Amino acid sequence: MKPERLDKLLAAQSTISRKDVKGLVRKGLVSVNGVVVKSADLKIDIQKDKVSLCGEPVTLTKYSYIMMNKPAGVVSATRDGREKTVVDLVPEYLLRDGLFPAGRLDKDTVGFMLITNDGDFAHRILSPKNHVPKTYVAQLDQPIDQDIISKFEEGFALDVKTNCKPASLKIIETGERELVEVILVEGMYHQIKRMFEHFGRKVVHLKRIRMGALYLDEKLEPGECRELTQDELRKITTKL
C-alpha cells in the first residue's frame, strides 16, 4: 500500500485535527516504531509501521468510511470528465486511495451518501439480498392515495422486465406538494422517481436521510462530510 502522511492518517481516523497532530509531534508525543517523530508529514505504511499517540498504540486501518451530505448538481462517481463528483468534494485530509461512492444518488438527489474504499462493505449494504434499508423523503407534485401506498407495500411491476420489491410508503405531510417517506431495500436506476411516475406522480425533490438504522448527521451542510465511527458502521448494517 502506498505510504501516506502521518498527520493525514491520524486526523482521518481520530477526533483530532491535522493541526493538533502537528502540535503533538512538536511536544514529542507521537512515535513510529518506537522512535519519536520529528515531522508530522512523515510518510508511513499502515500495514508495516506501528504508531503510538501519547504513549498509546493507534490502530490505523486501510479502509475509510465517510458520510457525506450530497448536494444537488454533483454526480455519484469517483471521477467524471465533465461533472463535479462526490469524491471531488471530499476534503484533502479525508482522502484515501481507492475512494468511491457506495451506490449512487441521481445528480439532483441530495442527502446521505456513503463514500468508502472497502468494496466488500459496499457490496454488503447494497446487495438486495441483504435487505439493508435506505430511507428517503420525497416531495411530490400531487397527493397519493391508499391504493398507491398498498401497491408500494405489495411490490409491483414497473414494466415487463422490472419488478419492484415491497417498499414502505407513508405520508409525512399532506397538501398540494405532498411529503412522503419511502424505504427501499434495493436501488435500481431512478427507482423512486420511476415508481411514482408509474402512478402519474412526479418527484420534485428527493433526499436520502438514512442507511440501515443510521440517520444523516443534521450538522453536515450540503457538500460537507465526516468519518464514520465503528458504532455508526454497525448501524448501517442494522435492519429496521
Image (cartoon, rainbow, N blue to C red):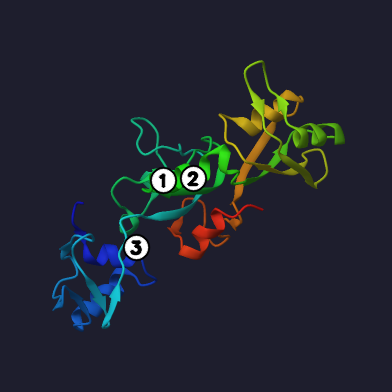
- Is residue 6 rendered to the left or right of residue 129? left
User: How many neighbours does mark 1 have within 10 angstroms: few (below 14), some (14-19), or many (20 or more)?
Assistant: few
User: How many neighbours does mark 3 have within 10 angstroms: few (below 14), some (14-19), or many (20 or more)?
Assistant: many
Proximity of marks 2 and 1: CB atoms separated by less than 8 Å: yes
Q: How far separated are the C-alphas under marks 3 and 2?
A: 23 Å
Q: Amino acid at mark 3?
A: Ala
Residue at 35% in and 65% down = 13
Query: Image height check: is 148 above or below 212?
Result: above
Q: Amino acid at mark 1?
A: Asp
Q: Amino acid at mark 2?
A: Arg
Q: Secondary structure at mark 1?
A: helix
Quarter of the image for residue 186 reads top right
Residue 143 in view here: no
Query: 104 or 80: nearer the eye?
Result: 104
Proximity of marks 3 and 2: CB atoms separated by less than 8 Å: no
Q: How far separated are the C-alphas under marks 1 and 3?
A: 21 Å
Query: Image height check: is 98 above or below 33?
Result: above
x%, y% of residue 119? 39, 44
| Residue 124: assigned label | 2
Residue at 34% in and 63% down = 12
Residue at 35% in and 36% down = 79
Q: Secondary structure at mark 2?
A: helix
Query: Image height check: is 24 above or below 194?
Result: below
Of labels 3 and 2, the one closer to you: 2
Of labels 1 and 3, the one closer to you: 1
The residue pinned by badge 3 equals 12
Q: Secondary structure at mark 3?
A: helix
Query: Image height check: is 35 above or below 102?
Result: below
Q: How far separated are the C-alphas under marks 2 and 1?
A: 6 Å
